[in-house]
Amino acid sequence: MKNDNISSILITAAFCAMIGVFFLLSLLLPKTVFSDTENRYLAQKPDFRLDTLTDGRFGRQYEEYLSDQFPFRDGWIRMKTAAELAQFKREIGGVFVGKDGFLMNALYPEDINRTLLEKNLDALSAFAKAASGSLGEEHVRILLAPSASQIFTDRLPSSAAPFGESTITDDLLSRLPDVTLLVPVKDAFIQAYSEKSGKELYYKTDHHWTSYGAYTAYQAWAASMGLLPYRPEDFEVQTVDTDFFGTIHSRLNLAASPDSIELYLPKNAQEYEVFYDGSTEPSHSLYSPEALKTKDKYRVFLDGNHGLTKIVNRTAPEGRRLLIIKDSYAHSFAPFASLHFEEVYMVDLRYYNGKISDFMEEQAITDALVLYQIPGFLAEETAVRIAR
């Protein structure tokens, strides 16, 4: 009995000492503003205010702060992931750990904000109708990219049952004036995957499509627009990085093989001017190689997120100007689209506050494309501004 008491005291003392050490470390260690591993800004200590205390916001913000600033956080995430994998778990932290090293976001029906979804679908269908009326239905397209889990069903864990994203596109189709407005990108991806070419449509460690995936989507979009898509042999494919770990990997920090990033460079030389956020000093490339030296290597495509990006192609046919309302999936897609248009404008509503209808009139837009990944579109609060 005496030995049991001593053991209990020692365990309690060790536990309290450990808590004390981590408390002191949390006070003494410098606070991290940005996590290179997770490629996001971390929560900082919230200011104390009576109103945020009474409505619960202060508690939630402080809990997030403690979680983000926990000492040696990356190491703990790695250990937690390893422990769960050792228990044969194949869904960890909202991520499916699939076959062939694929990590895929887990999305379930209960994760969806139905009120926001309804607003976004209403706004998207309203934009499609208005743009079709002013530009003509043959000049307007919507491309909602499916998640990897919707295509790589054979690579999912056997117990995985993700949300069927086709219900979203089916709902949208019922609201559109013409079904041809929706690009059949999922069909194109299923066909490409069935061919087993060895080329991957999505990165293993990131939620984005690869350059090959973007090219496959471009082919489907161009065909639906009556454009003659460039053939695979019209490009020189360059591998510019072989050590890319994406945002999904960052959430788990597990041992994994890196992805490679490829660029599809047209063999017939193009003359580009790219303007970011109203700048008058153009870049003469669609790519930002300096991004490959950072954690956010996907930023190599058109320098990542900007509110407004203007691409001028001096070698493209004159007279057509394409507006792409988009999320980051468009960054690797736009280089293909720019082969057919004198000017391409990309608008990201998360960082652009202008009115879309006014912009289209001011820039004499001739063609329009709305391009989002489906899970991103479901949760994007700024998407309702498409119809403004």
Image: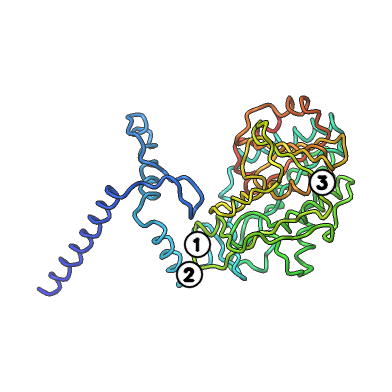
Assign the C terminus to one quadrant of the image: top right
Left-right relation of 33 to 108: left
Figure colour scheme: rainbow
Left-right relation of 211 to 104: right
The residue wearing badge 1 is 92
Element at label 3: loop
Residue type at mark 2?
Leu
Look at the picture and state if 148 lies above or below 336. Answer: below
- Report x, y in % for residue 242: 61, 64
Taking the image as drawn, is residue 15 in sight?
A: yes
Q: Which mark is residue 281?
A: none
Mark 1 and mark 3 lie on one chain; the one further toward the N terminus is 1
Disc 1 to disc 3, C-alpha distance? 41 Å
The residue wearing badge 2 is 85
Q: Which residue shows up at 56% across the image and 65% down it?
A: 97
Residue type at mark 1?
Ile
